[in-house]
Amino acid sequence: MVLCPVQICEVFSANKYPFPEDIARQKQMATEVSGRLRELLTTNEAGERRRDVVLKEIAYHLASWTTMVSAHTGTHTQTQGSQV
């Protein structure tokens, strides 16, 4: 069974874009698409770096935050318990 490009696009719900016959226009489109891909990769890498920084900060502070929450929760629980 051989699928033509239109069928493949339909199977994967992919968008289809017109592709010009003119070689110069094809090269221009390829350059534009490559530029957009580079921009997306750069954005993605920046997001990953930011995520890593935030996760490291959380890991660094997690123990002290846990202690602080436990102390606050214990105080809050004791206060509620004495009101009963």
Image (cartoon, rainbow, N blue to C red):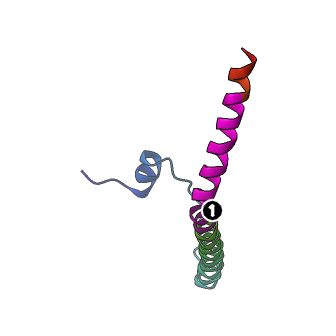
| Quadrant position of residue 78 | top right
Whether residue 79 sits left or right of residue 47 in the image: it is right
| Quadrant position of residue 28 | bottom right
> Is 67 situated above or below 45?
above
Q: Say which amino acid is labelled 1.
A: His
Hey, which residue is sitting farthest left in the picture? 1
> Is 70 situated above or below 52?
above
The residue drawn where x is 62% and y is 71% is: 53
- 57 vs 35, nearest the viewer: 57
- Residue 64 appears at what percent x and percent y? 62, 58
Q: Provide the residue designation for mark 1.
A: 61
- Residue 38 appears at what percent x and percent y? 61, 79
The stretch drawn in magenta includes residue 70 = yes
How many numbered dots are placed on residues in this image?
1
Q: Magenta stretch?
A: 55-78
Hey, which residue is sitting farthest front in the picture? 82
The residue drawn where x is 70% and y is 41% is: 72
- Residue 65 appears at what percent x and percent y? 64, 54
The residue drawn where x is 56% and y is 56% is: 16
Whether residue 61 sits left or right of residue 1 in the image: it is right
